[in-house]
Amino acid sequence: MLSYHEFSYELFEDYSSGVIEKVSKILDFFSWEKIVRIMLNLFGNLKHNAVCQEHLSDIDCLNLIIKLQNRHWVDEDINKQLDNLFEFFNENQQVFSSIDKLRK
């Protein structure tokens, strides 16, 4: 719920807390649809924040989304969320993985 509010972005932007990295590990290992839906909502809320985009790029969110798309989901909302996130990250992949980011 916090990810809907801009005041919470600094928590998600903090590399030392590793919130986005921990969430991605949860998504990678758990198949419970309620948890996956919540985590995908989190990614959807954070994708427009520049620092969080870097975090999502660092954890290779696009490959995680592709991996999740290959699973069978009963809840069609999860498939829609995955498709939306895939489109966003696929369109913006070059921006996230630029050589400048690697230098930084």
Image: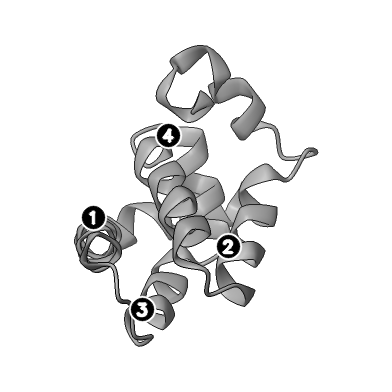
Mark earlier in primary sequence (1, 2): 2
Q: State the residue at coordinates (66%, 66%).
A: 25
Residue 48's tag is none
**Amino acid beneath label 3:** Ile
Give the number of the mark in front: 3 or 4. 3
Q: State the residue at coordinates (19%, 62%).
A: 80
Question: Which residue bears the numbered disc 4?
Answer: 50
Q: Is residue 103 above or below residue 31?
A: above
**Amino acid beneath label 2:** Ile
Mark earlier in primary sequence (3, 4): 4
Would you say 76 lies left or right of 9 here? left
Question: Which residue bears the numbered disc 3?
Answer: 66
Would you say 73 lies left or right of 67 here? left
Q: How far apart are marks 4 and 1 (CA)?
A: 13 Å
Residue 88's tag is 1
Q: How far apart are marks 3 and 4 (CA)?
A: 22 Å
**Amino acid beneath label 4:** Ala
Mark earlier in primary sequence (1, 3): 3
Q: How far apart are marks 1 and 2 (CA)?
A: 16 Å
